[in-house]
Amino acid sequence: MSQFSSEDEAELQSLLRELLKSVKDRISGAPSVECAEEILLHLEETDKNFHNYEFVKCLRTYVESSLGTVIEEETENFTRGDGHAIGPGQDTLVHAVTKRTRESAKYKQMMQTLKQTMMVVVESLINKFEEDQLKKEEMDRKSQHEQSSSHYTDNCSDSDSSFNQSYAFIKHEQLQVIAEKLDPGRPREVRLEALQSLCYAPPSDVLSCENWTGLRRNLSAALTDTDPELSDKVLQFFAKTFSSSPLNVTKDIYSTIGNMTTFWIRHPEKYMEEIIENTLSLLALHSEQGMSSPGSEKSLEPIHLISLLDIKATWFKKWMDGYYSRTVVLRLLERKYKSLVNVLVFCPSGPARRTLYTSKELEFVYFVHSLCVLGRLVMYTNGRKLFPIKVKKRRDPVTLTDLVVILISIMCVCLFVCVYSLDSLSPTNLVMEVLRTLCDRTECAVECLYQIPVIETLLAPVITLLKGKLTSSAPKLNSLESALTHIADTLARIATTERGLSLLLYDRNLVSAEGESISAAHVVVQFTQRLLAKELHVFSELEIPPAVSGAFIFVCRQMYNTCEGLQVLRPYSLHECIAKAWRTTSSVSERVPTPVPGAPPVITSQELQSVVAWEEMLLDNLLNFAATPKGLLLLQQTGAINECVAYMFSRFTKKLQVSRCEKFGYGVMVTQVAATAPGIAALQSSGFVQTIVVELWSALECGREDVRVVHPKSTPMDPIDRSCLKSFLSLVNLLSSPHAVWELLGHRALPNKTEYNLREMATSVLDLMDRLIIINSDAKIHSLFNYEQSHMFGLRLLSVLCCNLDSFLLLESQYNLSGLLLQGQRDNVTEPEFIIDGPSVERNHILVRIGTVGGPSERRLPPRALQKGNDPYPWPMVSTYPLPKYYILDVPKTLRTKQGKNNMFKALDPTILYVCLLCKTVCVCVCVCVCVCRYGKFLKLLREDSEQDLCLLLKHCQEFLSQQRVSVTSELSCFQGGYPGHDWFASTVFLLMHGDVGRSLSLLLRFSRLLPSAFLWPPRLHSSVHLPIEIAQSGIHPIYSCTAHYVEMLLKAEVPLVFSAFRMSGFTPSQICIQWLGQCFWNYLDWSEICHYVATCVIMGPDYQVYMCISALRHLQQDILQHTQMQDLQVFLKEEPIHGFRVSNYLEYMEGLERNYRSMVLSDMRSILPRSS
């Protein structure tokens, strides 16, 4: 369609006419021709039906037919890269192709043709329009003459009166009819006729009628209607009303018109700018005296009047809500009306106390209005740029920080001095609303709140109370309580962000009660301790309100639920203070006697509810110590871990968040708790584990009973159906630690029933193991509605569990997993080939995983995905051991030496290693010796008959370590006998010493005297006498409470994206780190890197264990971020080795970490062994 025919021109004319009819209302409402042009130019932005107009569709078709080939050619050229390069200013291929297309000859030809054609079409359309307009004007004259005789008239009206502006007297009944006709549900013509009649009625009659309320509501609806003719009629009525209405109804008219800001985006920008500038110009008018000179005659200014009309500055809030108008307001304030900001800033000094009530009230209204405007203004970047502001009676300009300090002072002064009856207009509540808004916006908080003077002002009352100086002029208790609660609320919001938390923890610019310089965190925790101990003088004779104590505990909680915050607050033993207060409160609630009929109650129901609420608040705050590894140890030491987990379970079942400042639920905290033996035991006793299992079973086997099945459910294509993914990840998080597997499955035999009821649901992890994983009978198969899907779920879960070698050893020793899986493969054969299905592929993967040990370049795992083609699964199927040679890679050349020794250890004198190690051992299955020795033989480090030597070494280590173990009375599995897992460090040393039992044992005994043994050798400190008794009996190993704690702390500071990814996934860095460290990186690093890890930590210090984990996670950053989006982070980290990681590549990075953190990390590692010789 390069040229338009006459038929095309006629069609375009018709389509254009239809388009103009569709937007007629918008164009006719424009105040000028320029405004009408603006409306048409921005039609695509403002009209949601723009692309549905036939005229637009026709133009699009013409453009596509004219330029389609050009666009295709340019796209192909850029894709091939034929001499074209996308410049730095062109972000995408689309931009580049568009630019080239617009420069083409066809584009210029198209534009010229289109322009000429449209000129002809428009000229013809204008001629027709003029003809139609003449006819319409004639018809309007006739209709107006007829309508004038139908108006309401009265013979008593004076034709010479100036009030006779087409007005007529009107009865109340007629106004009621008009109000009914204005209902938004009536047709447009009826509403328009009613408005026309209303405009001829006297405003005084309308405003004084009984139906004014309903009439006003319908007028507001018409004002916001999309029909411009309706809204214009309403504005005409209001314009006449303003000229004659009394003052008592002006506010009603003003508030109704105030809704105009909600729809002025439909009008040209000039129209909006004119309204805004005229309003600001009016408000900027003020006298020199104003209301500021006491004793002088006061003059009212426009800003006082608008404050009376709209005390909370709703008009300004609406102006600032949309970017469309906000930019205009801020630009005008900066360029022309900055004096108006000066007036507003000058006002917030708090309402003064006056003798004349009216004057005080007016001043208060002005104050509230100014406060609301300023609060909205500083929310935006350009609004904050208006500061500093020069104001009267102040030598220095008012900065943003000064303004916030003034606001906080107002909040405290108003509470301590005067209490207002209206809570919604209370200065305290208004200031708190502003502060909350600033806290919720990061940029606002950084510029306005995260400043030393602000923190000093917030904590000034707290420091005064700590010093005991608030005695002679103490405020009312309710006022003091409110002030402290608001202060704590603001501090808690500041502590939720990294910048704010750092300010509270580390900036030592406050002077304590003792006169020393300390940080805000120390002031807050000291005050909290005094509150809990009831040692504050001002509250000495009264009960300290729980709201105050709870508010300040919550501030502390925002700090101690982070690793860095707990590091600062730990010396105060706040967990013990909270636990003591909880026990006291709990004993009170337990001692409440059963009510006796007729006898007066010992405690009222309201008082009892308060006690119970305070008890739950204390439990909630205690629970949040479990957010970090070291905090979980402190929680266990309080003896309240079971009650806290039970409370968490009650909130978890209600789908409640951790707190008002937390974006996520309890997923991370549950994972943290499940990493330890006492934690998983508490989860089990609370019913948490059962709930997760039942939810999984319902999703996997039952489906939703409340959904009517119209179409059958599609067969899932993924190994884990999306409906079960959340339950799968919850189980992975729960069972990630070997402690969880030991506690939930240790010494527990499978039911192996002869018959299973179809309605019998799994309620424990043991049931899942029996029903979904170890399916060794027809009864189990027939008990599943979705056998293949459910069994695949169980096998995927088993694969993840077996990634932890200690968990695998337990399952293998109790349930003979490998034999069961091999039998399943043999049963899945149709001679002469295997049946390739989901379960057989997954079993094959697991058999290879558990049948070999090695790092990323030492073993090959079969993939789970099938290939296209005739042979979808070319990898060897495993049905017997040993594995096919395909899965066992060649020994790396660096390990092939004449004597089979590792090259790296040639440079290390054995005596250095003797002096550098620590140890402690445990019972282990005999099968693990075979596994370890097989790996050693693969590495050419051991001879063929080394299994007995390894067993002998492990026996000697167990005997040695058992002599240094404290006696613990506990039902936890980890205390039943020795260390429940395998001694992977002793096995590593055995391979290092090439299977020499004597040298290995001598090395371990000498190493056990040194600090690194506490962290490199997990069995060494298992309930050891060298630990403080409370740690030895806790069931929480120092590797978790110390090493993993600092891994999380440093990861947040050094690799924040990875730390955030863990938080989003519900997994914790400590979980994967204790798995890496517990098995000495076996299966995650190649043997050479394992040797480097051991040597580095022995020679450089045990804190390098922390730096090693940080380096590994930093190395995996891109993979971690990717798998977080795929929602399988925990599965990826557990199943995949650390590809491409070399210790030598990260030594320089680890040395940098040492310079920054060694003084803290190493000193804490040393502090956990006070009883060590």
Image (cartoon, rainbow, N blue to C red):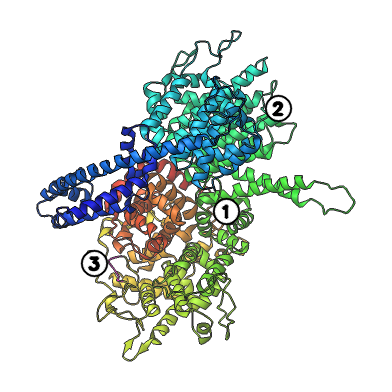
Say few, some or many: other residues with alpha carbon within 10 Å of mark 2 (under 14 / 14 to 19 / 20 or more): few
- The mark nearer the N terminus, 1 or 3, is 1
Contact, mark 1 vs mark 3 (Cβ under 8 Å): no
Direction from residue 254 to residue 267 in the image, left or right: left
Q: What is the C-alpha distance between the residues marked 2 and 3?
A: 79 Å
Name which residue lies at 25% across and 69% down.
891
Q: What is the C-alpha distance between the residues marked 1 and 2?
A: 36 Å
Percent coordinates x, y for residue 11 in the rendering? 25, 53
The answer to if 466 sits in the magenta stretch is no
Percent coordinates x, y for residue 747 in the rendering? 56, 73
- The mark nearer the N terminus, 1 or 2, is 2
Q: Is residue 142 visible?
A: yes
Percent coordinates x, y for residue 466 in the rendering? 62, 28
Camera-near label (1 vs 3) is: 1
Identify residue for label 3: 892
Q: Nearer the viewer, residue 1153 or 81?
A: 81
- The mark nearer the N terminus, 2 or 3, is 2
Please, what is the three-letter code of the amino acid marked with disc 2?
Answer: Lys
Name which residue lies at 68% across and 14% down.
355
Identify residue for label 2: 476
Disc on res. 638:
none
Q: What kind of secondary structure does the magenta stretch mostly adopt?
A: loop
The answer to if 857 sits in the magenta stretch is yes
Above or below residue 550? Residue 804 is below
Q: Quadrant of the N terminus?
A: bottom left
Above or below residue 759? Residue 211 is above
- Residues shaded magenta: 856-860
Farthest residue, direction left: 83
Disc on res. 656:
1
Residue at disc 1, secondary structure = loop
Q: Quadrant of residue 597?
A: bottom right
